[in-house]
Amino acid sequence: MKARIVTLPGDGVGPEVTAAAVAVLEAVAAHYGHRFDFDEQPIGGCAIDATGAPLPPAALAACQAADAVLLGAVGGPKWSDPNAAVRPEQGLLALRAALGVYANLRPLQVHPALAALSPLKNEKLAGVDVLFVRELTGGAYFGAKTRDADAATDECRYTVAEVERVARRAFELARGRRRHVTSVDKANVLETSRLWRSTVQRVAADYPDVALEHQLVDSMAMLLLTQPSRYDVVVTENLFGDILTDEAAALAGSLGLLPSASLGEGRNGLYEPIHGSAPDIAGQDAANPTGAILSAALLLRHSLGLEDEACAVEAAVEYVLQHGPRSRDLGGSAGTAQVRDAVLAALEEHAGAHAAFFSGVRACG
């Protein structure tokens, strides 16, 4: 296979973790006979410094022409003024809208070897395997905004079509998992949530093999911490999804572990670790590249259709998480490069010895 992948390293630790993910993708291409062409473009604070725009037109055009986009992180103290006219996160929001990536997938699994790092008791973490599907291009983040000296507004707006398409994506994904969807809203208060609930309920009729339950967002925030193993696929709107997925990330023990994929109707998707730019450790070879590497695995699966290769990367990461070395956020002392090299070594051995090397490691998916 030939594919063109645009990389947006961004700010802070973004360039370091993105480079690790690219190294893994290059190894996959070499092992499995593919050709991946990489095109690095600026986004975020570094793009503002260089061009005055958080997403330069040339970078956007490159992303729109690519088969997939791999993002590091954006932002940092230098650009943190919320009243600034131009801010790094504007580039990310514009990119999501331009690519039409309306469904943000955030898989969450708790690795048994790392359960002690979670703030929850170990018995609550057994069997936790949740896929969050967050609507990404609607709601308050994209609604009309006003502000004067005495008041401000952020419009939260959803159409039936916006809700229906992300709901269908959630139900389709649930069919490949445990066939259970939890839809999260605030239908007891918000009109947009009442539209959300009625639309999801109607879509569910087309998936009689998938169970549906509704939860209010405030009770869901509690249930994620008290009964996390009962959930399979969780679908919700943009703002609620942003908050709940960061809350749930605490279950895994570190933000550095978790990947994400943002998908639309076509092949192209946007892939990024869920952590931020972590400027306090940038340039110190201290960032955990696992989330970025697992985001590359999602890229292989969802944009390129390379399921075996995605599974190989995930198995290599699983092996390193079990056997080490571990990065500092996981209680170890390994730097970004050392973790990257360990994943590459595991991937190399897997490519030569196939599944026998990973006996005892959880199966893909």
Image: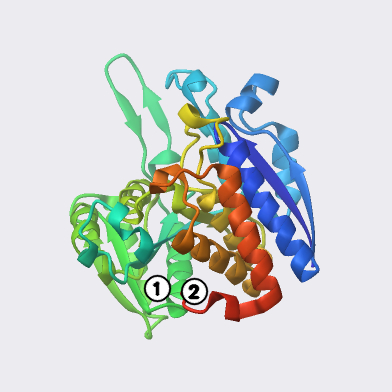
Number of numbered discs: 2
Q: Dot 2 surroundings within 10 Å: few (below 14), some, or many (20 or more)?
A: few
Rendered view: 310 above or below 143: below
Q: Residue furthest top?
A: 149
Q: How is the image coloured?
A: rainbow
Residue at (25% x, 66% y) in the render: 214
Dot 2 or dot 1, earlier in sequence? 1
Residue at (42% x, 40% y) in the render: 141
Q: Are marks 2 and 1 in contact (CB under 8 Å)?
A: no
Q: Disc 2 and disc 1: Cα gap in Å?
A: 25 Å
- Amino acid on which the number 2 mark rests in the picture: Gly
Q: Position of residue 167 (x, y in %)?
A: 42, 66
Q: Is residue 268 visible?
A: yes
Residue at (43% x, 77% y) in the render: 177
Q: Position of residue 356 (x, y in %)?
A: 59, 81
Q: Which labelled disc corresponds to residue 365?
A: 2
Q: Nearer the viewer, mark 2 or mark 1?
A: 2
Q: Position of residue 157 (x, y in %)?
A: 39, 46
- Give 146 or 217, whichever is nearer the viewer: 217
Residue at (24% x, 54% y) in the render: 217
Find residue 40 and report its image quarter. top right
SS at badge 2:
loop
Judged left or right of residue 234, residue 135 is right
Q: Which labelled disc corresponds to residue 316?
A: none
Q: Dot 1 surroundings within 10 Å: few (below 14), some, or many (20 or more)?
A: some
> Which residue corresponds to mark 1?
203
Rendered view: 15 above or below 114: above
- Amino acid on which the number 1 mark rests in the picture: Val
SS at badge 1:
helix
